[in-house]
Image: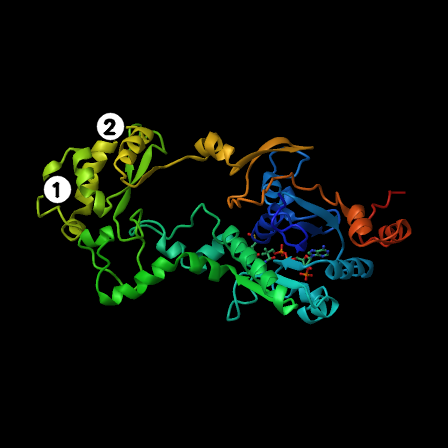
Amino acid sequence: MSKALEGVRILDFTHVQSGPTCTQLLAWFGADVIKVERPGAGDITRGQLVDVKGADSLYFTMLNHNKRSITVDSKNPQGKRVIEELIKSCDVMVENFAPGALDRMGFTWERISSINPRIIVASIKGFGPGPYEDCKVYENVAQCTGGSASTTGFRDGPPLVTGAQIGDSGTGLHLALGIVTALYHRTHSGKGQRVSVAMQDSVLNLCRVKLRDQQRLKAGPLTEYSQYGEGIPFGDATPRAGNDSGGGQPGRILMCKGAPEDPNAYIYFITQAPVWEKICDVIGEPTWKTDPEYATPKARLPKLNQIFERIEQWTMTKTKFEAMDILNKFDIPCGPILSMKELAEDSSLRNTGTIVEVEHPTRGTYLSVGNPIKLSDSPSDVRRSPLLGEHTDEILREVLGFSDHQVAEIHDSGALDPPRKVAAE
Ligand code: CAO
């Protein structure tokens, strides 16, 4: 079985999280991803949040699997020559520099596409064209400007950012789709094109149900929000809804046996209408099945707090896993709150390759996420991230066809290596 993206070569000019997420995904699918890094320094994340002295950080290793690393100073004339050769031999260039940085290196879209008209140039920026287009952006800024923070948290608390990296990894996923779409288009157009994704746009795309609710406000209060049942008037913007379900089926996070001392002894419980009668039986309130005060979803809406309090009295008698087992038998939608520790130890996630153990020469064995997208006929494995510049000479020789003499010449120019320290007299 061959890998889905075998034969596709990526010039990976990405750093930190958003861009590397995208190119890692393409690498998992079999693309030959050549990561260009600054000599001596490399991707800044190599040295961020270091847990093993002298080894690349988990931040870096978990975002750069299956790639090759070449160090090139893109501001050195010989370095520019190497990058031009890479542009000629790659199908895609991916970058997430600050706005204007690639142009300042001399690699405008016009120049890149004149070097290789078939190349696809894919970019992540914080914002699209508009008042903030020149701003540098990190994860939480995107969550705040894309509508996530204003709609996350509790109504009476401040906006909250989420643990899921929707700004960085979420944008990387969007970009990966843009790249394979442009590659597909190239099969009949014969030409490359630019693919641009803004982090603000990606977060907003993921927050679409909150934009839906913004418009629904015009028609009256959002009746599935617990605020409605509490009699609290709505303002003119989508409010924060705590753990209320974002769909038409009310849901909440409820305590289970062990809470609140155990911070993760909770379960998400959805009072889906078709299984209401089963819920009533399970929690010991059979009269609620026919009582007009409880029998219909509409009648229940103003009483959701009281209903969930009653359900919680039941969930508190069970561990989250016991509750899950019982509720699943009745098709009542629910899910235990799983800690990172529990996920790291989950044998089924390891069996499917969603969590993998990786060997690394300087840090030993570590855990990482694997490819969450499974293709039936195209396997995807996880190989360790490259050391800084590990493949520099290999790429110059094998990909660019440089002779030993040419490789030595480029090394001598200082384009591939950190500046030499001059010994003190
Ligand atoms: N050789 C020589 N110079 C190099 C180089 C190389 N191989 N690789 C990068 N550089 C240079 C760039 O050319 C740039 O130089 P100039 O400023 O002189 O043009 C410089 O390194 C810094 O690049 P940068 O501005 O992109 O990096 P930063 O650390 O200052 O900013 C970030 C980081 C992420 C805020 C910014 O890149 C950005 O806004 N990117 C777009 C949005 C994004 O992806 N954000 C998510 C990041 S993950 O949280």
Report the quarter where the C terminus lies: top right
* Left or right of 114, for residue 3: left
Nearer the N terminus, badge 2 or badge 1? 1
Judged from the image, the quadrant occupied by ligand 1 is bottom right
In the picture shown, does residue 342 fall above or below 196?
above
In the picture shown, does residue 207 fall above or below 1?
below
Q: Residue, x 25% and y 33% (percent of image)?
A: 315
Badge 2 amino acid: Thr
Q: Residue, x 60% and y 40% (percent of image)?
A: 381
Callout 2: SS: loop
Q: Residue, x 58% and y 59% (percent of image)?
A: 179
Q: Residues within 10 Å of mark 2 (few under 14, many from 20)?
A: some
Quadrant in the picture for residue 149: bottom left
Q: Is residue 22 visible?
A: yes
Callout 1: SS: helix
Badge 1 amino acid: Lys
In the picture shown, does residue 379 fall above or below 214?
above
Query: Which of the labelled discs sits on residue 317, or is there none?
Result: 2
* Left or right of 212, for residue 63: right
Q: Which residue is mark 1?
A: 289
Asked if labels 1 and 2 touch by Cβ distance under 8 angstroms, the answer is: no
Q: Residues within 10 Å of mark 1 (few under 14, many from 20)?
A: some
Under 8 Å from ligand 1: the CB of mark 1?
no
Q: Is residue 230 visible?
A: no
Q: CA distance from mark 2 to mark 1?
A: 22 Å
